[in-house]
Image (spheres, helix red, strand yellow):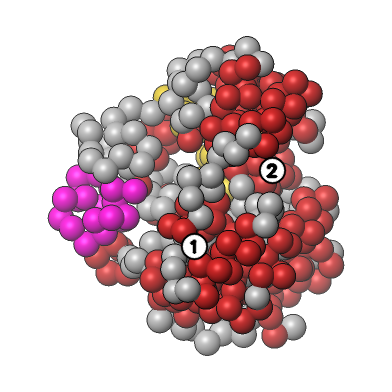
Amino acid sequence: MEKTVVISEFNPFHNGHRHLFDEVRKTVPGTELVCVMSQNFTQRGEAAVMDSYTRARHAVESGADAVIALPAAFSVAPAEIFAKGAVKIAAALRDVKYVAFGCETDSLETLVKAAEITTESERFRGYLKNYLSDGLGYAVAYENAYIDCGGEENVLNRPNNTLAVEYIGAAKSINFNPEYIAVKRYGAEHGSSSPSEDICSSDYIRQNLKSPSVAGYVPACVLADMKKSAGDYSEGLKRAETLCVLRDGPAGLPRVYGCTEGLENVIYGACTQGLDPTEFCGKRYSRSRISRILCANLLKITRGEVESYLDNDLYIRPLAVDEKRKDEIYSDLSASRFPLYVRGRDIKKLSAEALGCLKKDSLAELMYEHLGGKIHGNLTLLDL
């Protein structure tokens, strides 16, 4: 069966995600809908409001056929690496014909052109380097360089457009050639602090986890679990990250993606003074960038390891599948280019690099359990 892949975080799953699923089903009736989803830590360097298995189940109960884990090494990373890792997993699945995503434009052609410019143009790289040298933040420098190369304004200043462009560029870089389904967002903008129509942003939901005001904006299964188990782990995560920086000093931080230009000294200085590094680092460095650095450092995810994982075969790790088709789905996933990892004995199928990547997942899961105070005490891969 032909597959459509949606790359996601579902933090948490809401009506906008369900709209994306509905549009995919309308566009390609009968497709198998498979999501590649971040686990317990997100691309913003934050702890997810619910664990990965719960969020994956929400996606399946809302129409997905299966949800596959995006390794933690790629989840807590800049957009380019997040996209490369997710596309790598998608390309390893059998019979993937489509990749679908939400975006702020209704022009797929614009996104494809943007991907060509940002991944292939030497002029773009030159402009980007110059803007960064002038002290501009990366996001602004990136958009300006794109416009200077003939790109349209108000395209790459929108977060979903930017991720879509990264997905297209990542696919092209590994000769993976799916068709794309671009679904324009409607309702509340990404990051909006207020709802619109029957849609609100994930940010709004995360800020109002226990409030009745979110009831109309998420499926019933999500609302029920939010009331029982959703949590804001930001303060605990900040403390753990700060202690890690103080223990190890600034020397190890440059091994993490995004920690360049002496940023390690700024982060370490903020931590020693009891300041929040995400607030202390000024306009040049976004909160998300600093949060990613701190989270990756906590999880011991280094640039060298990430690049090694990108260069080697990994694994297909299902987080949830449609129970009615469980045997059929697992049989199909077992025919993927990467080995299927479901239970402990599947470790013997993995290469050394894949096992190293899986151990990062295990560490991240254990850290998340401790942040939430829900420690299962199971044997982890870290014990091997």
Across and down, in percent, residue 85 comes to 68, 48
Q: CA distance from mark 1 to mark 2?
A: 27 Å
How many marks do you count on the picture?
Answer: 2
**Quadrant of the drawing holding the C terminus:** bottom right
Q: Residue at x 27, y 37 (%)?
A: 199
Q: Which mark is residue 255?
A: none
Across and down, in percent, residue 176 comes to 75, 32
Direction from residue 264 to residue 280 in the image, left or right: left
Q: Residue at x 63, y 57 (%)?
A: 263
Residue 126: within the magenta? Answer: no
**Depicted 162 relative to depicted 247: above or below:** above
SS for callout 1: helix
Q: Nearer the viewer, residue 135 or 354?
A: 135
Q: Nearer the viewer, residue 9 or 1?
A: 9
Q: Is residue 320 visible?
A: no
Q: Main secondary structure of the magenta part?
A: helix
Disc on the earlier residue, 1 or 2: 2
**Residue position for label 1:** 277
The amino acid type of the residue labelled 1 equals Pro
Q: Which residues are magenta?
A: 203-222
**Residue position for label 2:** 84
